[in-house]
Amino acid sequence: ALATLAGVTFTATANILMRLSQTEDMGEILLKRVSHAGENWRGHPMRSMQELSVWLMAVGGIFHLKHSSGSDDSFGTFWALVWALQLGTMVACVLILGRHYWFTNQNQFEGSVQGNNPLQERNNEKEVGSQNISPLKSVPSDSICSVRENARNEGLVLLDGNWYSVGKFVPHHPGGADVLEQYLGADISLVFRVMHRNPDRILKYRKPLRSATSEEIQALTARRKDLCKEMMEEYQQNIEMVTKAKPNMPKNFDLEAFEKDSRLLYQRFLENGYFRPTLLWFVGKMLFTLCFLLLSITCMKLIPSSSVFSFIFPGIFLGLFWHQSGFLMHDAEHHNLSGDERCNDILGWLFGTVFIGVNGAWWREEHREHHAFLNTFDDEKGFKDPQMREDIWIQNKNLIKFYGNELIHFFVNFQHILFLVVIAVAGRVGIMIDSILTERKFRPWTKLGNILHLLLHYSILSQTNHPVSVFIVGALWQSILSLQLLGNHYTKPWNKIYAATEGNFFVWQILATQDFACPIWLQWFYGGLNFHYSHHLFPTLSREYFHITTPLIKELCDKHGLPFVQVGFFQCIGEMIVNFNEVRKEFSKCGRGSVALMYT
């Protein structure tokens, strides 16, 4: 927690400097020291060692001064260390910047990881931006459909048989510019509705440019059919590798009939009000979550500290508190808890940033891309799905070429063994640090939430004589949530981004997802996300109704011959181990990757 606090201070200092035009380049230098830490240590090991030494000396010196003038009890020592971390980190920031500018003036090349002056880089970007270069044409695409390519270059999307011009809107898209860019030129009639809570209200302010011709519609439909066939073949190969069994796939898949039934199913859910949770359900879930926190504190008070259960039970209940808070953060950041977006953002901040310690806004940005780019990659830019990508293992053979770092080559040899250990030991702390270091936008309330999280958990863990043990047990218990969410997709195929966005959204989501089979009495533990088809086909659907919608989705899949997979938790873990092992074997045949380890 103290190390996280120091990281927050460093990142906050960098973000504050970046907010001011006069110090923007200084902030970028500091931020790159954190976000490109691996590249810094590889490219400038001596500089990194010097800067780390400066930080350690600053923290140690201030701690000595503060502690020598304060009390000798544990509380005084703790606050002396907190002060030392904060002030020491601030001093380190100043010294890092001073060293940077001193050597820049001497050598004219020291600066960012790439060796360029950040301010000069931005000036170059502005010069390029001032030219009449269409940003839309820079979007890579392997499409062979001329209709799609022409519409993409013109900044058009097809919706209900009409072309809409959205090129100028791309940079302002609330769900992310990259999401809308990747769908340019495609038919978004279904994905637009299932991804937005109020599609009709959005369309009220948009007028179509023109109607699509029958030839254009036929060309796009034919292209979707070809891509669906390719995705099904990739799915079949992937499942055969993992389960050693050949899945039954439709031989004559009727795409038009499937799309018609999909729209009817969406309309049925909409008419039944499944996209809005009831107040009773929300209040019940919130009280249910807080009960685990109360149980954790009660166990700390009642169980004798000499008993081994004095940290096991409090840790389990604390882990369940984080676990269930994660589900509520998920709902809030999907804007599924309240009809007011601002209220949803506040609830996401509360359940995520304050209760779990994971930046809710950061999670929302990445999770939107996860839904839009599920299990996809780009040959030029690498991973498109940020939440299914890890730097220390490879979960699909199509991703091998993106790993060129020597360290990953070593880990891949043991990834089928190590991935469970890494998730259990470092999963919780890792995602907390990741949400701080890779935040895309400075938000003051996020920093406030980080501080409140630390204060809340300091007050909770101070109720026990085994605070570290309780935290470790809770973190281990919460790792089950990580395994659950990864298991929904890890053994499924990865496709190129153009195949996913240009093909059929429902087909792609079905082939890249699976459900967890569990008894009714255990569904609370999985938060309803064991019904993952419901969530990924209809991202704005309320968890309250997943148990109703899932059988209807299964009927849709069975009718059209598409796979509807339900596996037990331990069966899924076994399949993940087999999958990692098969990818490891494939990696040994291919040798090292051709592209350096990339940071997104």
Image (spheres, rainbow, N blue to C red):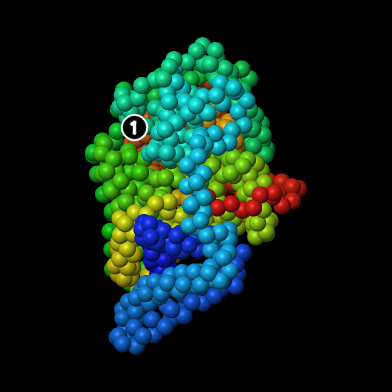
Front residue of 593/316: it is 593
Residue 198 percent across, percent down from the top left = 32, 29
Residue 80 visible in rendering: yes
Three-letter amino acid code at disc 1?
A: Arg
- Check the image and report above or below for 470 versus 434: below
Element on which disc 1 rests = loop
Residue 517 visible in rendering: no
Residue found 60% across the figure and 23% down from its top = 145
Residue found 44% across the figure and 20% down from its top = 163
Residue tagged 1 = 197
| Residue 77, quarter of the rendered image | bottom left
Residue 240 percent across, percent down from the top left = 66, 36
On screen, residue 342 versus residue 256, left or right, reads left
- Check the image and report above or below for 157 versus 568: above
- Check the image and report above or below for 288 versus 152: below
Residue found 51% across the figure and 11% down from its top = 214
**How many residues crowd mark 1 within 10 Å: few (<14), some (14–19), many (20+)?**
some
Residue 558 percent across, percent down from the top left = 52, 23
